[in-house]
Image (cartoon, rainbow, N blue to C red):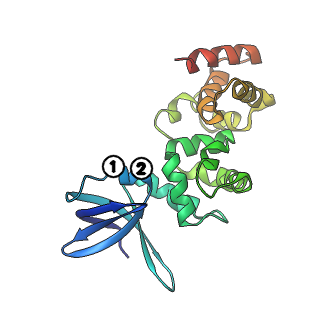
Amino acid sequence: MIGQLTGLVSHIEGGHCLIDVNGVGYVVSASSHTLGLLPRPPEVARVLVETIVREDAIQLFGFAEADEQAWFRLLTTVQGVGTRVALAILSVSRPSLLWKAVHAEDKTAFTQAAGVGPKLAARLLTELKGKVAKMPAPAGMSGASMTTGGGEAALSTSLHGSAGLEQDALMALEGLGFRRAESWPIVSRLIGENDGAGLDVIIRLALKELAR
């Protein structure tokens, strides 16, 4: 099982690259993000590799970063999401955005990818919501939106939208043109920091931050 490759990038074409390791060329499929981070041929690169073995083929999928590889594995556990669709999602949305999108129930981060329609996006949100809790939070999220009120209790409150305030605020901001994945961490934190604040206060404070 191949877990990593270090070699010369011979060429990059379409959704894959060719990496020469001691004279052996490995065809590695990757997201546009990873391909964009590779050095120009013929320079040496190191990529993390996910090996998929099937009856008729052995496929290699490369990742410049460990969190992208982890999300690739996670995405492919969802029914209807194969390797091609998983790479398409990772090509348009970074892992941090996907993490936020799942919690905010924002389909946009998924429907922007080729091969992902509204139904599949809805299934992704449903199936990933429980699994994503095991994934590391994006930088800045563990402190800002999860510490107020203490640990798991604060996180539970933010995710479930106590009394509908969070969802009402997100819907209002969405109507003003802000994406839910963008607004959710700000709204969640503001609700925790301003106990008892009404919808108008949360929206006003969120707009100040989003306007920056």
Residue under the image location 67 percent in, 41 percent down? 106
Q: Is residue 65 visible?
A: no
Q: Which residue is mark 2?
A: 33
Q: CA distance from mark 1 to mark 2?
A: 7 Å
Residue 11 % position (x, y): 28, 62
Residue under the image location 74 percent in, 33 percent down? 161
Q: Quadrant of residue 98?
A: top right
SS assignment at label 1: helix
Q: Which residue is mark 1?
A: 37
Checking the image for residue 101, the label placed there is none
Q: Is residue 164 left or right of residue 124?
A: right
Residue 15 % position (x, y): 43, 61
Residue 92 % position (x, y): 52, 47
Q: Residues within 10 Å of mark 2 (few under 14, many from 20)?
A: some
Q: Is residue 10 visible?
A: yes
Residue under the image location 69 percent in, 18 percent down? 202
Q: Are the residues tagged 1 and 2 within 8 Å (C-beta)?
A: yes
Residue 164 % position (x, y): 80, 30
Q: Is residue 41 left or right of residue 1?
A: left
